[in-house]
Structures are given as C-alpha cells and as structure tokens.
Amino acid sequence: AVRAGLGWWGKNTMVLIPGIGPWAVIGSVMTDAELEPDQQLDRDCGACSACLPACPTGALVAPGVLDAERCLAAWAQRPGLVPAEYRIAMGDRLYGCDDCLVACPPGGKLLRSTIEPGGRFDLRSILAASDQTLLTWFAHWFIPNRDPGIVRRNALIAAGNSSSREMIPHVALYAGHPDWVLRAHAAWALGRIGGEAATAVLDQRRTDELDVRVRAELA
C-alpha cells in the first residue's frame, strides 16, 4: 500500500492516508491489466509521536516498531489465557484496541465527524448468548477457528474490570464451565469484582477445581 502511494508508514505501524489517517481497511485486486504505477508519497509523521505514549501497554516500543506480545488487539484475537498483566489494561474492550489510532492527529478530524455511536455491547447478553448467536453478531470479526469462547473470554475480562457486583451471577455461570480457559478468566473476574457473593463462588471452586491452571487463577 505504501509503495503504491496510498499513504505513508505511521509511527504506530499503520498506513496513514491523507484525509483519513489510519482509519482505513486496505484491500487488493489481482489483475493482468497494464497499469501505470503510482509514485510513493514523500511524506511521514514528522515530529509527531502522539501514538507512542497512547499505547496502554507500551507495545509501540519505538517509532514504527510494534511488540505484538504486548499489543491488546493481538491478545484479544488469540486463543488461550490473556496474560494477567494485560487484563486490567484491556478495560471494557471486547475486540481490538485503537488507542494509537485515536491519538493520531491525521485521522482526528474524521473521527470527530463520526455520527454513528461507538460499538457498545451488553456483557450480560454476550455471556448468555449461544455459540451461533455470538458468531452471527460478530460475523465481521476475525475470530480464530470461529471459536465464540474467545469472545466470551474477553467479555469475562471486561466484566471483571467493570467492578460491578451485578455481573457476579453472570460471571459465576462460567466458574464451572467445561472450558478451562473460561473457568480461569471467570475466577480472575470474580476476584477483581470482589464481595461476599464472589468470594463464596471462589471458595466453592477451590474445593472442586482439579485443573492446576485454573487453581492458579483461583489462588
């Protein structure tokens, strides 16, 4: 895309397009048509580094260099446990992050002009939904192996970060789930919410849980 002249490499590792900034999805077309190549843009971010401190986990380790092992957008799409050190930073995110895009001035005007409300979802509905319902709601997301458990895992993290006692019964349903990853994140979420009701569920799970990975979360 950069070589084709669509935009320039941003310090946030995104392609920045004039008038749009990073808010673009880039596609490609295979063709045997004879096309005159465009010129690459002679442009860069200059002195602006607004994206670098905006990253909640410091994944942008240098201008144009991303440590994917710290990137919340990457972790939100991976199967398995989200490392404990990144769960609080995930906040209420279900998918993606975008903080480095929001901080990018070239796309600021476009972002401010958006009239559609941001994507907000009821965590209780997500935790109660069937597999097929989740895959229908989020058909446009990349979900590895189309595993709705990844969405549920992220919802459990968001529920824990909500600190809402109203979420306890919805999270507690996953404390004994067949999937150990969901049990582990449910344990973390209950511990983060706290309170007598959450503690009672955790105490019971400590008695019943056999998986050492989940027991570590319960501890």
Image: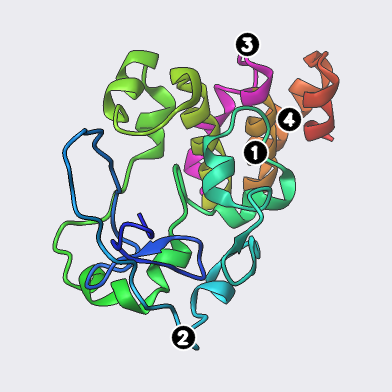
Viewer-closest of 77 and 35: 35
Nearest to N terminus: mark 2 or mark 1: 2
Instruction: Give 169 or 38, whichever is nearer the viewer.
Output: 38
Q: Quadrant of residue 103?
A: bottom left
Name the residue carrying label 1. Answer: 190
Q: CA distance from mark 2 to mark 3?
A: 52 Å
Q: Can you tell which of label 1 and label 3 is closer to the viewer?
A: 3
Magenta residues (range): 163-182
**Residue 182 position in % (x across, y down):** 61, 25
In the rendering, which numbered label is found on residue 86? none
The nearer-to-camera label among 3 and 4 is: 3
The residues tagged by marks 4 and 2 sit, at their Cα atoms, a distance apart of 52 Å
Identify which residue is drawn at 56% across, 66% down.
64
* Closer to the camera in the image, 174 or 76: 76
Tell which tag, 4 or 2, sits nearer the viewer: 2
Q: Quadrant of residue 134?
A: top left
Q: Is residue 163 visible?
A: no
Q: Is residue 35 magenta?
A: no
For disc 4, the marked residue is 202
Residue 46 shows which numbered tag? 2
Amino acid carrying mark 3 in the image: Pro
Specify few, some or many for label 4: CA neighbours under 10 Å numbering under 14, 14-19, or 20 or more: many
User: Considering only order in the chain, which callout, 3 or 1, is on the residue closer to the N terminus?
Assistant: 3
